Amino acid sequence: MNELVFFINNVVIAGSVSGSIYAMGAVGVTLIFSIMRFAHFAHGDMMTFGAFMVLLLTTLFPQAGAAIGIPTPILLMPLAMALTAALAVGIDRTFYKPLRAHGVKPIVMVIASLGVTLMLQGLIRLFAGTGGSSLYVDDRKEIFRLPVPIESVRVPVVITEPQLYLFGLTILSVIGLHLFLSRSRLGKAMRAMSDNPDLAQASGINTNTIVAVTWMLAGGLAAIAGTLLSLDVTFKPDLSFFLLLPIFAAAIVGGVGHPFGAIAGGFVVGFAESLAVFNWSVLLRPFRDSLPEWLELPANLAFVGTEYKIVVPFFILVAILVWRPTGIFKGKVIT
Amino acid sequence: MPLLDARDVYGGYGGMNILNGVDMAIEATEVGVIVGPNGAGKSTMLKAIFGLLSVNQGEILLNGETIHNLPPNKLVQRGMGFVPQEHNVFPSMTVQENLEMGAYLKPDNIKRMLERVYEFFPPLKEKRHQPAGELSGGQRQMVAMGRALMPEPDLLLLDEPTAGLSPLYMNEIFERVKEVNAAGVGILMVEQNAKQALAIADKGFVLAAGQNRFTDTGAALLADPDVAKSFLGG
Ligand SMILES: Nc1ncnc2c1ncn2[C@@H]1O[C@H](COP(=O)(O)OP(=O)(O)O)[C@@H](O)[C@H]1O
Ligand SMILES: [Mg+2]
């Protein structure tokens, strides 16, 4: 039974953590694609930027959270979301909008977003340095060890405070997004523009407003995901290197243009990663005696080493593009 | 004063003129029908009226006010609705959501106009929670017309509403067009099914090569042997 708890900690919890983060990034990528029809490569850096804003604010007001009894970085996150949303709208106005107005091909937009990636990374390095830094300035990361009420089990289920916040906020974001897209006038207009931009315009929908709202949503969600990732591990200016491939894999697995597909895709990629790096030898060990003698159980039996985790989304991406380029939920094919 | 008055309109895509001095006027109570060979500029004329391309010369008046080169959303506010020939629904959205989008600029209309649209097109009420992309061609056309009716336009522009439909559905659509017109909406529609369309037309316009060739009442055009010989297939 200890082995099962080990599995819960390393696969179920770890997979849900990465899954939630990828989901929130992938939703942004998919929304941006469905409204503006290009793959936004600077999205990972928008996530980093959100975390960087939290770092900045937390450094400025390290004790803000103590007054109310929640961690300062969490308290200041809404402000960071607003700043990231503003940054996203600002970047669009400055870099992408003029290109759109010229009617450039999507590939030009993609290359522009690569430029934005480099610019954002430079900007963040300029202020935050090149190394890692903890978002916990005055607070301590709470780690909960939950004992399992079975006698033979001595290993506790381990979950941290930021992970609990992450799960809670992911659930809230998914519900919020669903209500926004299915109930609100603006959300429906967004789906209309994704379906048929010309007809949306002919119906009197102001497409500039929809574009701005899309950036705000994508930026806000990116800030949540980036912040909670940095709280779970640590803040680094090059976080996007570890995010870009999984979030695009998630968006494509889910069918580009389907926000809820992107969320499902995020969890598919997150769980695939944690299953791939899980040491299966641990689960087999209790059955050691019943295994044939010639089969010696190696100490580590994982599909890929943790340091090569990034190949998992890569393979998922290749596989889905070969077998089902429209994703699980029949999305658009990124061209 | 005519509802729509287009005078000597020149316009097209890029610098090239497709329309070379088109005149077109209809009254608020009328159904106007534009016919003519493929590539004559019929669709282009509707797009010019709805502000989707630049009018280089001439004048377009709606209720006596000049509207040429106003953007589509402004024209919707001034009482114009447009149903393009293709891609005229939001396929992944339900029938009802499609209709709601039509009233995007007049959200107060939604409740009342949904009822009216469902009265005009009863099949839509049954299918209101189904994605519009899953409907048959004829029902999609009803959704498209319903969407354009939601803001209560004075003038409805229809581009080939019966293209690709079976004769049964074609007649059904023409019936609905007549009813919508009787309810007080001026209609200007482009049609390939010229004879049937001219039969319900108060005014007919025969376009060729971006110019008016014949303009008269629908009945007079149908009776004119010259029109019949060159444009109605004998
Ligand atoms: N989007 C466009 N860009 C450039 N030329 C176009 C476009 N749409 C139509 N045309 C051209 O304009 C002319 C008139 O087309 P159209 O108005 O669609 O004819 P129709 O009378 O069959 O509706 C045609 O020669 C067509 O090739
Ligand atoms: Mg046409």
Image (cartoon, grey):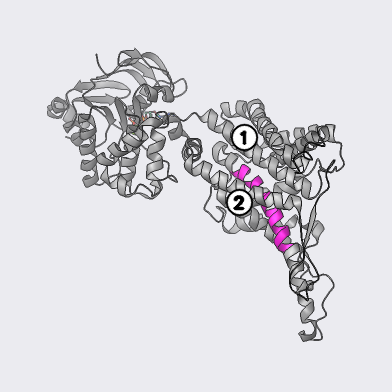
A21 in magenta: yes
Question: How far across and how far down the image is residue A321, in percent?
Answer: 61, 54
Task: Count how many numbered circles sit on residues in the image.
Answer: 2
The residue under label 2 is A263
Instruction: Using the image, tell me which numbered label, if any, was put on residue A246.
Output: none
The residue under label 1 is A216
B185 in magenta: no
Is residue B199 toward the left or the right of residue A48 in the image? left
* Chain of the residue on which disc 1 is drawn: A
Of residues B111 and A304, the one nearer the viewer is B111
Is residue A215 toward the left or the right of residue B98 in the image? right
Q: Identify the magenta region.
A: A10-30
Of residues B89 and A219, the one nearer the viewer is A219
* Chain of the residue on which disc 2 is drawn: A
Hey, what amino acid is under mark 2? Ile
Q: Main secondary structure of the magenta part?
A: helix
Residue at 72% in and 33% down:
A116
Residue A256 in view, yes or no = no
Is residue B176 toward the left or the right of residue A203 in the image? left
Co-location on one chain, circles 2 and 1: yes
Residue A210 in view, yes or no = yes
